[in-house]
Image: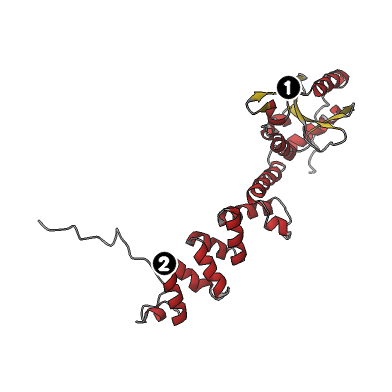
């Protein structure tokens, strides 16, 4: 019986393709396309073939010191990502170390911030002090932009316009209908509840209204959900749906009184306007 223990087919362990190596050369440095100083420095650092390839590809675009600093500081995947996206090498490495994040997390944030329409020329946007918090904000901002352009956004705005007459103010408290899907996303993010996913039901008549302090109308406080066809209250919630540290909290009594007055003075007397007719297309 033949001993096949030492036989390894090349199909199982294929040789790496290294088109950047000049196999006609006999000396290692020239074979790799390096001068003696480069070959010595790279050997001392113990770089593998992938980092050697990165060195060759990008050495003409960066200083030797910065490129060494990058390759010494991060793994090959991070180094490739930083180089391919033309990020400043030393600054990016130092920033990621401070934030304890990868280059992929940074690039994910930058892409979302750009899609959300943020001003990428601002230093504070490109290099936020807290990358994790900025990443979450950019994700929410992008979701808000997407919400305002999705297929139900027009129906949402149309329903909001029909319900605009429900706005009211009394004793330092005001109420108004949500105007855009992105406002639901923002409201849910601030108050830590799930109203951000209610765009479709709002467009169908189970509308969302914001209850705010009159002196701070842009600051989220309570969220009211009403079915305008039956005028039934579906839910009323503030921060965290009134749960904190495992305890159920009570809704502010002034808010409850305000909603009761609003229902009596406004909602009960109000009728949902007819849906506006679509204009006929010109022939």
1 and 2 marks in contact (CB < 8 Å): no
Residue 136 is drawn in which quadrant? Answer: top right
In the rendered view of the protein, which quadrant contains the N terminus?
A: bottom left
Query: In the rendered view, how is the structure colored?
Result: secondary structure
Q: Residue at x 66, y 32 (%)?
A: 194
- Percent across and percent down for residue 120 are 71, 58
168 or 92: which is nearer to us? 92
Element marked by disc 1: loop
- Percent across and percent down for residue 246 are 62, 26
Residue 267 is drawn in which quadrant? Answer: top right
Between the residue at mark 1 and the residue at mark 2, the CA separation in whole angstroms equals: 62 Å
Q: Which residue is mark 1?
A: 250
- Percent across and percent down for residue 244 are 66, 28
In the rendered view of the protein, which quadrant contains the C terminus?
A: top right
- Percent across and percent down for residue 151 are 68, 39
171 or 246: which is nearer to us? 246
Query: Where 189 sits versus 8, above or below?
Result: above
* Residue 104 in sight from this viewpoint: yes
Q: Residue at x 74, y 56 (%)?
A: 119
Q: Residue at x 44, y 82 (%)?
A: 36
Query: Where 15 sits versus 164, above or below?
Result: below
* Residue 35 in sight from this viewpoint: no
Q: Which mark is residue 48?
A: 2
Q: Is residue 258 left or right of residue 112?
A: right
Number of marks in picture: 2
Foreground mark, 1 or 2, reads: 1
Residue at the extreme left of the image, as rendered: 1
Residue neighbourhood size for the residue with mark 1, other residues' Cα within 10 Å, grouped as few (<14), some (14–19), many (≥20): few
Q: Residue at x 66, y 51 (%)?
A: 130
Q: Which mark is residue 98?
A: none
Q: Earlier in the sequence, mark 1 or mark 2?
A: 2
């Amino acid at each position: 019986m033949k001993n096949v223990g030492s036989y390894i087919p090349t199909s199982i362990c294929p040789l790496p393709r290294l088109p950047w190596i000049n196999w006609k050369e006999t000396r290692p440095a020239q074979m790799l396309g390096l001068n003696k100083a480069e070959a010595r420095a790279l050997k001392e650092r113990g770089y593998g073939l992938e980092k050697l390839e990165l060195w060759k590809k990008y050495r003409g675009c960066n200083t030797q010191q910065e490129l060494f600093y990058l390759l010494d500081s991060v793994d090959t995947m991070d180094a490739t990502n930083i180089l391919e996206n033309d990020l400043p090498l030393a600054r990016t490495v130092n920033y990621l170390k401070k934030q304890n994040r990868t280059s992929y997390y940074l690039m994910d944030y930058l892409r979302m911030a750009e899609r959300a329409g943020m001003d990428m020329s601002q230093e504070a946007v490109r290099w936020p002090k807290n990358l994790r918090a900025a990443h979450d904000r950019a994700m929410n901002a992008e979701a808000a932009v997407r919400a305002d352009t999705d297929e139900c956004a027009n129906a949402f705005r149309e329903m909001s316009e029909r319900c605009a007459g429900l706005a009211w103010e009394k004793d330092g408290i005001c109420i108004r209908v949500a105007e855009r899907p992105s406002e639901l996303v923002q409201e849910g993010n601030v108050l830590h509840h799930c109203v951000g996913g209610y765009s479709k039901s709002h467009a169908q008549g189970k509308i969302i209204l914001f209850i705010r302090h009159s002196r701070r109308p842009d600051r989220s406080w309570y969220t009211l959900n009403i079915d305008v066809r039956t005028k039934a209250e579906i839910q009323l919630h503030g921060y965290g749906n009134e749960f904190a540290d495992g305890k159920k909290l009570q809704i502010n009594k002034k808010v409850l009184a305000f909603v009761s007055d609003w229902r009596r003075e406004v909602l009960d007397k109000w009728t949902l306007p007819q849906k506006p007719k679509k204009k006929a297309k010109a022939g």
